[in-house]
Amino acid sequence: RDFFDPSAKTRAAEAIKKVESQTSAEIVISVRKLSGAYRAADLWLGAGCGMASLAFMIYSPRTFTARTMPLDVLIAFALGIVLSANVATLRRLLSGAKTIATNVDNAAKGSFYDLGIAKTHRRSGILVFASLLEGRAILVPDVGVDKAAVGDAWGKAEENLSRAVRSRDFSAFIAAVEGLGPALAPVMPRKEGDENELPRSE
């Protein structure tokens, strides 16, 4: 809930100001509830619940009325869908790591261009993209950002951001954003005349 609290944008903007006081990189934060459609996962769990209920009625020593069994299976199917749709952990498990990674990556790249991050004159924009259902956060750099030069600090930053998203800890997320300042400053130090060209969060 804290990620979408009205005060979240203010705290994010303050964190970005702190980072941009140390580096010429321009930071934008985008937070999404989810990055893709996971209806297939819902249907898989619904089908599993339906089959489990049918197997129970067939093999149970109790007697069930054949006339109502299809309805019982349908109810179990519907309950499985509702359960998957409302429990993020189940959706992640049923969707698979590859699908989740692809969805987050595609959504992040789409946000990068939708937010116009590539329009800075030094091409120094970095998108901090967080997706809550998937429990992942990634950094999307523009071409002017030398990710390799940042080294291990880049991967560490993504790990810290993702850990905060998984635990729904907005304070830890903000701390991880602020940690980008020291990581980027040696490679992209702030220059005289640097101005903010991008919206800070979305």
Image: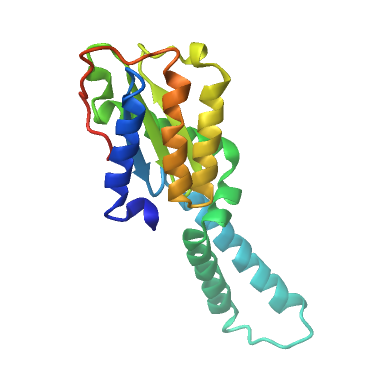
Q: Is residue 13 above or below residue 51?
A: above
At x 62%, y 61%, the residue is 48
Q: Is residue 107 above or below residue 171?
A: above
Residue 98 at x, y = what percent?
57, 35
At x 50%, y 50%, the residue is 40
Foreground residue, 91 or 192?
Answer: 192
Foreground residue, 75 or 82?
Answer: 82
Query: Which of the colour schemes (rainbow, by chain, secondary structure, one colour) is used?
Result: rainbow
Is 56 left, or right, of 150 in this rendering?
right
Foreground residue, 127 or 188?
Answer: 188
Residue 189 at x, y = what percent?
37, 14
- Locate residue 46: give its quadrant: bottom right
Residue 84 at x, y = what percent?
52, 60
At x 34%, y 20%, the residue is 25
- Locate residue 30: give its quadrant: top left
Foreground residue, 69 or 88?
Answer: 88
Is 60 left, or right, of 6 in this rendering?
right
Q: Is residue 156 above or below residue 166?
A: above
At x 71%, y 75%, the residue is 56
Residue 155 at x, y = what percent?
55, 26
Q: Is residue 26 above or below residue 98?
A: above
- Locate residue 199: give its quadrant: top left
